[in-house]
Amino acid sequence: MSSTVATSDFGPAVREDNVPRTIAYWGATGVVTVVPLLAAFAYLTTSPEAVENFRHVGYPQQLRVLLGVGKLAGAIVLLLPRLPILKEWAYAGFTLMWIAATVAHYLAGDKPLFLLPVVLIAALAVSYVTRSPNRRISANAMLS
């Protein structure tokens, strides 16, 4: 099976056999970045719903501000080209944040809502696995 290379005026050539992978990456990354951006806006603008949700799960309001800044920074890093080390941190941060959200909502009795972070973790995994090599840390960078 041979693959051809499609050229574009907007960036490097894309191999046709990588198109499904690219679509999967950008679809998953879009979800994984839009949700935290919207949450960061709600957290940092002191949305009454965000304040109430933090009270409901027993989190202090200071954590809302820290998570708002972290979500904003993580989403921006995932969308920017390169920055592989920061991307690793963003993926790890989102994973830990959504695991904590799953546990917090489950313990607060939000039975259907606690599954939303699980879905987001799955989308995050798709984004992580399907990203292109220029968005990954090279073995040499990890060893130095």
Image (cartoon, helix red, strand yellow):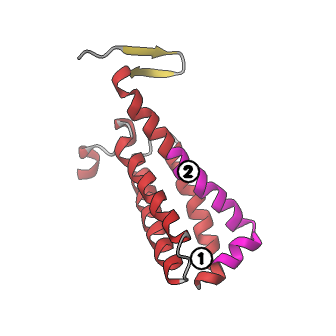
Position of 60 relative to 116 (above/below): below
Position of 2 relative to 115 (above/below): above
Q: Give me the residue at 58% from left, 82% from top.
A: 57
Residue 85 appears at what percent x and percent y? 39, 51
Say left or right for 44 vs 107: right
Position of 6 relative to 117 (above/below): above
Say left or right for 18 vs 45: left
The part of the image, by quadrant, that contains residue 61 is bottom right
Secondary structure of the residue carrying numbered label 1 = helix
Residue 119 appears at what percent x and percent y? 47, 58
- Residue denoted by label 1: 63
Secondary structure of the residue carrying numbered label 2 = helix
Q: Which stretch appears magenta?
A: 29-53
Residue 120: within the magenta? Answer: no
The residue nearer to you, when weighing 112 against 2, is 112
The part of the image, by quadrant, that contains residue 83 is top left
Few, some or many residues within 10 Å of mark 2 (<14, 14–19, 20+): many
- Residue denoted by label 2: 33
Q: Of all residues shown, which one is farthest toward the front?
A: 112
Q: Give me the residue at 45% from left, 52% from top.
A: 123
| Residue type beneath disc 2 | Thr
The residue nearer to you, when weighing 81 against 50, is 50
Q: Give me the residue at 38% from left, 52% from top.
A: 125
Question: Can you say which quadrant of the picture contains the N terminus?
Answer: top left
| Residue type beneath disc 1 | Leu
Q: Nearer the viewer, mark 1 or mark 2?
A: 2
Q: Is residue 143 visible?
A: yes
Few, some or many residues within 10 Å of mark 1 (<14, 14–19, 20+): few
Residue 36 appears at what percent x and percent y? 58, 58
